[in-house]
Each structure stands twice: as structure tokens, then as C-alpha cells.
Amino acid sequence: MSKPQNYPLDLYRGDSAGWSFALWADEDHTVPLDLTGVTAEAEFREKSAGTTIVTMSCTIVGSAVEVRLPASSWVGAPPGGGWDLQLTFADGSVRTVVAGKVTVTPDITDSTPAGLFAERQIRAVS
């Protein structure tokens, strides 16, 4: 088994954010990972096993996981910490595919959040 891919989040407080992680079964990114029956969860905490939890919404679309962080869901979130994305397969096995540090820049303006969409392709399993 390999370690999760490192993907730090650089967030701007008060903004919505989103990422799409394409998951592959091979290193050459030619075989999409079969996510049939898989559930995905992602959280942001001030530290590992920390008590302040920001839950991100996860949606599986084909062989990708879309992770969303609406602006309203992280009011009062810590100023930084860590996050990860875990997959639970139909057989009960769990695999953390992406993880990283979280940096939060304080915002200035309190306004309607704008969306951010980034794409990242990773190899999910060995």
C-alpha cells in the first residue's frame, strides 16, 4: 500500500471551494478506478483527531470524487490544520487517497462566496 497523495489546501476564509480528484488503478492513468459501491468522506480538522471538524461534501462521479466546501459550512473553522479524503469500499476496506495541510487566509469582505474548482488526477491504489 502506498501513502495518500499529498494535496495541501490553501483556503481563503469565507469563500466556497471545490476539487475534483480523478482516481486511477494504475500509475500511467490509463485504467480508471472502479468506484462502484464506494463511499467517500473528507474532513478538515485543526490537528489529527482534533475536536473541531469541518465536514466536506463528497460526490462520486464516474471514477472521480468531487469534494466541496461551501462557505457556510466552515464558519468558525480553525485557522489551519489538516485534511484527508477516505474511500470505503463495498468489502469494508478503507483507503485514504489524498491528505495534506490546510492553510486559511483570513478574509476582509463579508460577501456572497464565489466558487473555486480545481482538478487533480491521482493514483488511488497499488
Image (spheres, rainbow, N blue to C red):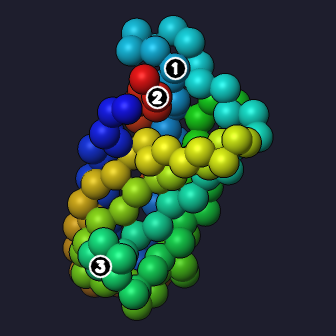
The tag on residue 81 is none
Q: Is residue 108 left or right of residue 32?
A: left
Residue at 28%, 54% (x, y): give it. 100
Which of disc 1 and disc 3 is earlier in sequence? Answer: 1
In which quadrant is the N terminus drawn?
A: top left
Amino acid type at image mark 2: Val
Residue ID for mark 1: 25
Residue ID for mark 3: 46
Tags 3 and 2 in contact by the CB under 8 Å rule?
A: no
Within-10-Å neighbours for mark 1: few <14, some 14–19, many 20+: some
Report, in whole angstroms, how far the alpha carbon at label 3 lies from the one at label 1: 31 Å
Considering only vertical position in the picture, is 35 above or below 77? above
- Residue 122, position as x, y percentages in the image: 41, 30
Which of disc 2 and disc 3 is earlier in sequence? Answer: 3
Considering only vertical position in the picture, is 13 above or below 41? below
Within-10-Å neighbours for mark 2: few <14, some 14–19, many 20+: some
Which of disc 1 and disc 2 is earlier in sequence? Answer: 1
Tag 2's secondary structure?
Answer: loop
Residue 56 lies in quadrant: bottom right
Amino acid type at image mark 1: Ala
Within-10-Å neighbours for mark 3: few <14, some 14–19, many 20+: some
Residue at 66%, 48% (x, y): give it. 92
Residue ID for mark 2: 125
* Residue projecting furthest to the right: 37
